[in-house]
Amino acid sequence: MTDENDETDERLARLTRATEGVAPRANFNARAMAAVKAEHDGFGWWSDMPRIAWRVVPIAAVIATLTVVWTWHASSDAEDALVGSFDSMEVDW
Amino acid sequence: MQRGDVSAFHGIVEATSARLVRLSARIMGSVTEAEDVVQESYVKAYRALREGRFDERSRVETWLHRIVVNTSVDARRKRRREPAGTLEDDRVGAADGNAEATVALRELAELLDALPDDQRIALVLKSVEGMSSAEIAEVVGCSEGAVEQRLVRARAALKQTGSS
């Protein structure tokens, strides 16, 4: 087991040394940056939408809920006021 | 940088491209494919930075290693589905005259070809890239114990392949 592990390690060590010289071609960085630049140029307000929505949607949901509650509350207050005014209405013949 | 500064990203590419292409080539067995993988990885990393998805819990270089390893694994899976000869491409890729390295990459790929992706990655990062188990665990996103287990299994599998 140990001998065969040693053999594997030796082979891997030899291949490691032999591949130390592996390098990208001379124009690789320029090509990679061109791809990054294309990605950058592809960004617009629509591509920012998921990120914006992630922050805006929960806040908008809270505001909408508060608005519904407030509207419901305000309308029931107005209804109470109306009922009250009918109660106290005097009918004049 | 978090907001997607292209010139700052250029500095990252300059500082990391040689090491990342070598890492991917050792996983893929091909310089040409490694260049494609690393280019795709840079685009993914830039997009993540732009969208604020880099949480800064790990170093940028470790994070890039993780992206390159995952993209290499995906590319290998895709290659298995769509086999294509790359030897000719690699001869073009090794136009700087490093034919010995190209042959060694191929030998390394053949040696590790039978291993599952997780064991192959652990062995390349440990025995070829010289990373510690802790560094490997951070790159691949598992525990050090799991890395050790993968290394033991990988060596056992290579032993079996060697003796058969």
Image (spheres, helix red, strand yellow):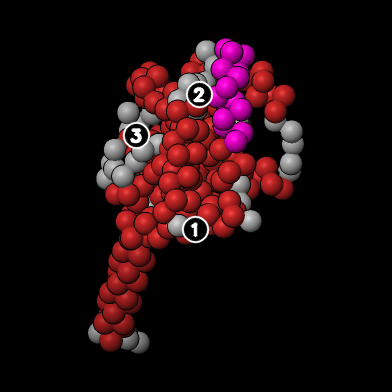
Q: Residue at x 66, y 45 (%)?
A: B78
What amino acid is at disc 2? Answer: Val
As drawn, A32 above or below B74: above
Dot 3 or dot 1, earlier in sequence: 3
| Residue at image location 57% in from the left, 22% down from the top | B100
Say which element carries label 1.
helix
Tell me the chain of label 3.
B
Asked if residue B106 lies in the magenta stretch, the reply is: yes
Image location (x, y in percent) of residue B56: 28, 41
Predominant secondary structure, magenta span: helix
Say if B44 sits above or below B146 in the image. above
Q: Quadrant of residue B55?
A: top left
Q: Is residue A24 above or below residue A84?
A: above
Callout 2 crowding tier (Cα within 10 Å): few <14, some 14–19, many ≥20 = many
Magenta-highlighted residues: B94-107
Q: Are marks 3 and 1 in contact (CB under 8 Å)?
A: no
Location of mark 1 (residue): B156
Q: Secondary structure at mark 3?
A: helix
Q: Tell me the residue that label 2 is attached to.
A: A22
Q: Is residue B94 above or below residue B70?
A: above
Residue appearing at x 32%, y 86% in the figure? A91
Magenta span includes B60: no
- For the N terminus of chain B, the quadrant is top left
Spatial separation of the CA atoms under disc 2 and disc 1 = 28 Å
Q: How many marks?
A: 3
Q: Is residue A75 left or right of residue B25?
A: left
Where disc 2 sits, the SS reads loop
| Residue B61 tag number | 3
Q: Position of residue B106 (x, y in %)?
A: 61, 33
Question: Is B150 or B81 nearer to us in this picture?
Answer: B150
